[in-house]
Image (tube, coloured by chain):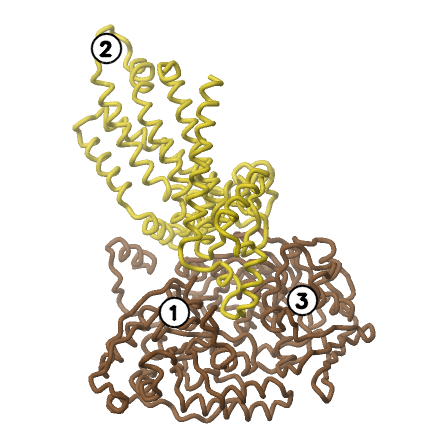
Amino acid sequence: MKKFVLQRLVQILPVLIGISLIVFLMLRLIPGDPVKIMLGERASPAEVEHLRVELGLDRSLPVQYLGYVGQLVQGDLGRSILRNNQVSEDLSRTFPATIELACAAMAIAVVLGVGLGSLAAVKRNSWWDTLCGALSLLGVSIPIFWLGLVLLLIFPAGLGWFAFSGRTDLSFPHPTRLYLIDSLLSGSWANFVDVCRHLVLPAITLSTVPTAMIARMTRSALIDVLSQDYIRLARAKGLPWLSIWWRHAVPNAMIPVVTVIGLQFGYLLGGAVLTESVFEWPGLGRLVVEAVRTRDYPVVQGGILLISVTFCLVNVIVDLLYAWLDPRVKQA
Amino acid sequence: MRPWLLGVALLLMGCSAQKPVTEPFGTGPPVPQEDILIVGKPDDASGLDPALISDGESSQICRNLFDTLVRHASDSMKLEPALAVSWKHSPDGLTWTFNLRKGVKFHDGTPFNSQAVVDNYSRQLQPTHPLRFPGNRFPYWADIWGTNPCLIDSIEADSDSVVRFQMHEVVAPFVENMAMPFFAIVSPTALKQYGSDNFKHPVGTGAYKFVEWVPRERIVLESNPDYWGGAPEMKKVVFVPIKDATSRQLQLEAGKIHLITGVSLEKVEKLSLNRAVKVITQPGMNVGYLAMNNEDKHFRQPLVREAICHAIERKEIAKALYRGLAVVAESHLPPMIWGQADLPPYEYNPERARQLLAQAGYPDGFKTELWYMSAARTYYPDPKVMGEVLQAMLADVGVEVDLKAVDWGSYLERVGKGEHQMALGGWVGDTGDPDNYLYVMLDDNNVNRQRGGSNLCLFKNPDVHERLLKARQIVIQEERAKLYSEAQVFIHQSCPSLPLVHAPQVAATHPDLEGFRLHPTGTMILQYVHWKRP
């Protein structure tokens, strides 16, 4: 098992080198000068040149890249060009926010998706199946920002339920920066309720696509498994339905579902930017998009690298889950 | 039907053509029980050390935390004492002496004195100053005073309450420049204590004290009971970044926040009818103009430029694109700035434009390109629409315009280098001095084809240049005003570019919030805000 994990981790390395190189080059090839953006309309050419030298942007691209990799090896992601604070500090603030949102959305997606998919598979070709199919289609095709706005109009603006934006209105210590946990650690029920009020709508909005994907995959995987000979045999042996379901059907149907969950989780990390924008969620997606706009190279590089590392790790975890669900994978 | 339900229904139907609202509607949300003000801003601050920032969002907050030596009156561009009670210059204009306010303390208890002033400015002046930390860059210091060489030679404390600035050369707008929020005074003790992280721990002498900053979530301030200008009534102010304009508006209407800035002009009419909101408009210290490249084969001819000026119906633009809230610009100088000239407006006259084009050798017009920036600016809420309107007006006189969107990140550099034929140009002033407008936008010294200058028309005129330079070197305002007035006459005659509009700034507040002042500079003054209670 250790060898299996190590193998997977080593495979991440070339991926990360490739990503760092692509991001580095793309940022520098798109039009726009970070120095001019930073100094604004008033900067004199001498000042622009001075800052360009100070930031090392006057050096050749290979030298800049090697310098960047050298910093990375030492664990230094650099300082934001715009704000001058450590990039790692920015990431350590925004990443937990995105993780919290993604986990909440994924929890909703797994419960609803697996539930709806199972219902559709069991009640195949009934109106339940049609309803689940329609809901899945709706989930995949509904524009996130539109749904977010509708939810804002209905709940906080109309009914006064939940919060408009942000992560909390209250002040309490943030040792983990995962506010659900921090609010519980603070010992105040009011803090926890306030954090939940803020989390519900963005999590629901973000969960629509993964819910639909998981539901569709669960349905097709279960239909496939339920038509297998071993399920028929189990039924013929007179095993109780629940036992057939949990011991034979669900574990075998879960491999493709776990794949989808893993992929969707990666999507949630990088693709939460629309939801984060509508609900002013101070997450990683918004940080990176804002940094692209202002050509804040170190922040974009650090953010994308972090998303990539997380995506790769999620894939490793998915691989491990495969091995757990199906021992043949580990042997292979 | 309830308004929000109607909104949802229309959104669900994908319908945007709402029935126009003409009658007042809604009810005012309750007044908060406590003296707390929640402000929704379009963005978070980039930092809270005034010397290090260059963005409006940060400076609006810093204005309430820190004081400058002199400042603008809260409702005009008139200069008034702040941390300095009086000031004077030497006869040759090379020395400025400030008498400082006594008995003022920073929020951390450090006494405010001349040494604090010297420390603050010396860290920006001297590259090896002990209070200059790694990564410190002072954009406004570099821009206004220069770095190598710097216009300021030295800053010295003559006594505990007198500070003296020795200049290398006369800088006429010296005091005006010192009123910029970027030259506010920070506690030297805090600078020593926090070093490079000072921008996260602001300690000033301002009306409000810093409490907390959770980046991208909120900045909290509290009233400074010992403020030399009188303690604010509002005990607590919370700034919340809300990028989306619709969300800001919804939260204001619901009473969740009490003050928003960056209200889009198209919302003003409807918001004004909502009893839950009070709309505040203020003429902006900005100008949007059509920059013609004076070195281009077409636009190097003054007759062509004059023709363009007569082909644009600016009143209609101000009415249609700015909901009648913008002022038609007759000069690059906003109306609230001194040094104005009595200029005859460029009359909208397409027939005259066609005649001028014919005289210039273009009886059938010509084909050209108009660049617009990809991002909205204060002076152009929608640059694309502005481009399309100009395109249609110019087509009417035979000038066929191709529109080209250019990414804002590279826009100024490319236009400054003169890659354009025509481009949308604009400027938001920092100070109330004409130098900050005319010299920047129209002087020879700011034409730079290699690196991109701020003179986006690449306009060079010896008569204008002579007057703008001279006006920088004398300190008597009346004489300067005369020079600026003359320079504008020459500019008007050459019509290097067409000033279009001075766009307004709009904020909206809770109907019971009183004392809020949106300054022409864009600064948000919260010292006088309070709740109207029965």
Q: Between B124 and A122, which is closer to the camera in this rendering?
A: B124
Q: Would residue B469 be visible to someone looking at this image?
A: yes
Residue at mark 1 shares a chain with residue at mark 2: no
Which structural element holds mark 2?
helix
Q: Which residue is mark 2?
A: A235
Spatial distance from mark 2 to mark 3, Cα to Cα? 79 Å
Residue type (three-letter) at the residue carrying disc 1 = Pro
Q: Between B335 and B292, which is closer to the camera in this rendering?
A: B292
Q: Quadrant of the N terminus of chain B?
A: bottom left
Q: Is residue A234 left or right of residue B124?
A: left
| Chain of the residue on which disc 2 is drawn | A
Q: Which chain is brown?
A: B
Q: Between B252 and A7, which is closer to the camera in this rendering?
A: A7
As displayed, is residue B187 above or below residue B293? above
Q: Which residue is mark 3?
A: B206
Q: Are marks 2 and 3 in contact (CB under 8 Å)?
A: no
User: Residue B243's spot in the image, x, y percent?
Assistant: 45, 58
User: Residue B303's spot in the image, x, y percent?
Assistant: 32, 89
Count residues near mark 1 (Cα–Cα under 10 Å), then give few for <14, some for 14-19, many for 20+.
some
Q: Which residue is mark 1?
A: B381
Residue at mark 1 shares a chain with residue at mark 3: yes
Residue drawn at 36 percent across, 35 percent down: A264
